Image (cartoon, rainbow, N blue to C red):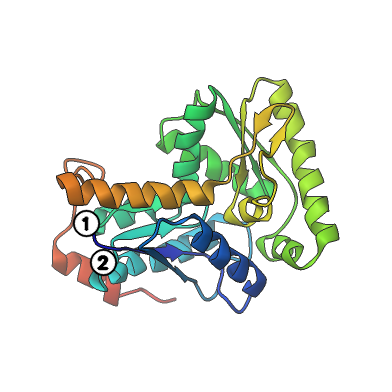
Amino acid sequence: MKPIRIWYQSYVDYENGKTYWDRLRKHLDDIVEPGTTVDIKGITPHDSYAHAIVEFRCAREVICNAVRAEREGYDAFVIGHFQDAGLYEARSVVDIPVLALGESSMLYGCQLGQRSGIITINPRYIPWFHHQITKYGLERRVAGTHAMTFEPGQILKAYESETLAREVEELFAEQARPLVAKGVEVLIPGGGIPMLLFAALRNHAIDGAPVINGIPIVVKMAEMAVKLRRLTGLGVSRAGEFVKPPAEIIGEFMTHPKLG
């Protein structure tokens, strides 16, 4: 089977997340199969503040980038951002597989335990996660969301400080333990930044509940989706949620942003 090319869409740019990108690059190289290449792409201005309006701004660029990825010959598009902003819209405009960190982590968590819980970096993300959980139909499986108190830019600094990295780990555990006590069996860090930060903690678990690193999960799902598409032609449904608009409508979206 020919090599696989994956566009990995970060919501951080290299200028503002150099240490994170460098570590992510190495992590991706370590987990992909021989013949798979993953190109990390960023967004400028990057996602620096935990708010829905920032997610929507980034989502527009992500949708356009999914179209660009397909036109440039990529085999899959991965949204490496837990909030998955733009996921459904991107799936509706391209034929290559589109996978996302949040959805993939939650779905895989269902195979590891009956009830999962999410610990995000900031309380302002919790309403967004509730919308995600409902959209994915996982209300009974993703049973709780707790939060630390970082902005995206602040938690990036943990990649440059072992002391801060340990503090993040401890704060995560503080939020996780009450969830496990209430019956949560799988713990999901609510973001690629904390997931990668914890990636070095092999067999990471809190009170018996495994802590998911969704980055290898979403990349492996992307590789599998590409292989299945090549073997069987399998792709997303065009009967409802992901119906594809005409080419001219996609072109209109790509070229006509309405600026204030």
**Residue 215, relative to residue 249: is it above or below?**
above
Q: Amino acid at mark 1?
A: Asp
In this view of the protein, which residue sits in the foreground, 15 or 255? 15
Pick out the residue farthest to the right.
163
Instruction: Write down the residue under mark 2.
Output: 70
Among the two numbered marks 1 and 2 on one chain, the one whose residue lies closer to the N terminus: 2
Q: Amino acid at mark 2?
A: Glu
Name the element at disc 1. loop
Q: Residue at x 57, y 30 (%)?
A: 116
Badge 1 vs badge 2, beta-carbon distance below 8 Å:
yes
In this view of the protein, which residue sits in the foreground, 59 or 193? 193
In this view of the protein, which residue sits in the foreground, 2 or 210? 2
Q: Residue at x 59, y 40 (%)?
A: 212
**Residue 23, relative to residue 142: is it above or below?**
below
Q: Position of residue 246 (x, y in %)?
A: 14, 61
Q: Mark 1 to mark 2: distance in Å?
A: 8 Å
Instruction: Write down the residue under mark 1.
Output: 95
- Look at the image and tell me in which quarter the N terminus lies: bottom left
Left or right: 47 in relation to 251:
right
Residue 78 seen from this side: yes
Q: Residue at x 26, y 50 (%)?
A: 227
Q: Quadrant of residue 172?
A: top right
Residue neighbourhood size for the residue with mark 1, other residues' Cα within 10 Å, grouped as few (<14), some (14–19), many (≥20): some
- Look at the image and tell me in which quarter the C terminus lies: bottom left
Residue 83 seen from this side: no
Left or right: 88 in relation to 84:
left
**Residue 118, relative to residue 20: is it above or below?**
above
Q: Position of residue 194 (x, y in %)?
A: 66, 53
Pick out the residue farthest to the front.
34
